Image (cartoon, rainbow, N blue to C red):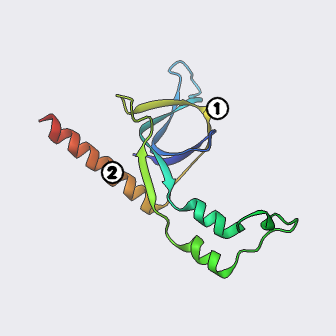
Amino acid sequence: MSVKIARLKGGEDVIADIKEVSAKEDENKTAIAFMFRDPYTVILDDQSEIEMEMWGEGDESLDEEEPEILASNKEAIEKNPNLILYPWAPLATNRDFYIRLEEVVTVYDPHGQVTEKYIELIEAKNGESESSST
């Protein structure tokens, strides 16, 4: 399993088992798309609160100088926000998706804890589907 997070053009972060796909006829194996298996949208629950604390509220923080991060704001940034994973394209019956390369801004390795949470979620989902099919 190759667990990665992809940032899509729309700004959405998607965690999945991600693989590059190439055309069978292509001898050079040039990637033409990504295959996302069991994709989930990644949300940090209190990210907006952190941004507001960092940059202040209202127009007074829009000075020409860059705003400073206060000590209390550093604490807010360092606290662990709630990580929420919810199914990407939840109405689809198949959980394998092919995404054009042009739709992906970047693909990166998630932190170990994020990977662990994703794998636990997938294993629990697969365990439920196996038990419900018997």
- Report x, y in % for residue 13: 54, 47
- Report x, y in % for residue 127: 22, 45
Task: Identify which residue, 53 or 88, lies in the foreground.
Answer: 53
Q: Which residue is mark 1?
A: 102
- Look at discs 1 and 2 and give the one toward the viewer: 2
- The secondary element bearing badge 2 is classed as helix
Q: Which residue is mark 2?
A: 121
The residue located at (67%, 69%) in the rendering is 54
The residue located at (34%, 28%) in the rendering is 93
The residue located at (28%, 49%) in the rendering is 123
Q: Inspect the image, locate mark 1, and give the three-letter code of the amino acid beneath it.
A: Glu
Quadrant of the frame with the N terminus: top left
Choose the circle earlier in sequence order: 1 or 2.
Answer: 1
Looking at the image, residue 54 lies above or below residue 96: below
Q: Which mark is residue 50?
A: none
- The secondary element bearing badge 1 is classed as helix
Q: Inspect the image, locate mark 2, and give the three-letter code of the amino acid beneath it.
A: Leu
